[in-house]
Amino acid sequence: MQTQLNDLLASGDSRAALEGLVTAYGDALTRFCAGLVGSTAEAEELVQDTLIAALSAMPTYRGASPRAWVFGIARNMAASHLRKRDRRRGLFARWQPPLADVRPHERSDARLVVERGLAALKPKQREAVLLRYQQGFDASEVGEILGISHAAARKRISVGVRSLRRALDADLADVADATTRTLTSSPHQAHAHDDTTSDQADLSAQQQLPTPSRVHAL
């Protein structure tokens, strides 16, 4: 896919290249932007802006990784959006994901906790953590996208992960307390569902958090 997109971008066939970018990375770009700005609706607008900017920039494309290239554009779009939003609201440092965007049956408590933890990170840490763990870029690619050295990218990812774990501690404890209260309030159902609930909570949390082995691998 990368080679195909590279050829399309180099060929000057902008329409085909844009369609290729949408097919290959549209969903991933939406998840990435949503992680940065905390809103699916805003993320969808940012992806549209990203693709428009990519279309305009195609004549200057010079053979970098298409994936890193388009995610770099998305990151810049999101950073600009956040600066404007910060000026308007003056509240970004204390922002929490808008619950109006959340359908309870689609998002677990653990997922919401992780989203709040991400929102508590500094923007530079958040984008580094999302690029590394949500999108799977290695530290060199993260550095390329963010315009920093490989060593600086590794450090930013590491600091971001440590900050995220600290931010999650209190919220995860709150979720555990709430789960315990719910189970103990229904004694007849608690015994039947206790093991399943615990297993599901553990699995959900593991899916959301960077694993120690991946962190050490950086």
Image (cartoon, rainbow, N blue to C red):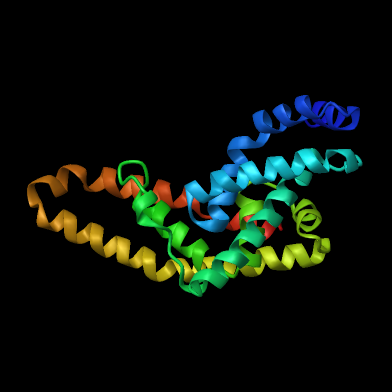
Residue 149 appearing in the image: yes
Q: Quadrant of the C terminus?
A: bottom right
Q: Residue at x 81, y 54 (%)?
A: 144
Nearest to the observer: residue 189 or residue 18 = 18
| Residue 126 image-quadrant placement | bottom right
Image vertical order of residue 104 relative to residue 19, above or below: below
Residue under the image location 62 percent in, 36 percent down: 26
The residue lying at 78 percent from left, 67 percent from top is 152
- Relative to residue 121, is residue 63 drawn left or right? right
Looking at the picture, tell me which residue is in the foreground, 54 or 165. Answer: 54
Q: What quarter of the picture does the N terminus occupy?
A: top right
Whether residue 48 sits left or right of residue 99 in the image: it is: right
Which residue sits furthest left? Answer: 188
Residue 162 is left or right of residue 131, and the answer is left
State the image coordinates of residue 178 (x, y, percent, origin top left): 24, 61
Q: Is residue 210 visible?
A: no
Asked if 24 appears above or below 145 in the picture, the reply is above
Q: Is 115 in front, or is 39? A: 39
- Measured along the vertical axis of the image, is residue 15 above or below residue 168? above
> How far from the left and from the top, in percent, is residue 186?
10, 52
Pinpoint residue 107: horizontal percent, then vertical percent.
37, 46
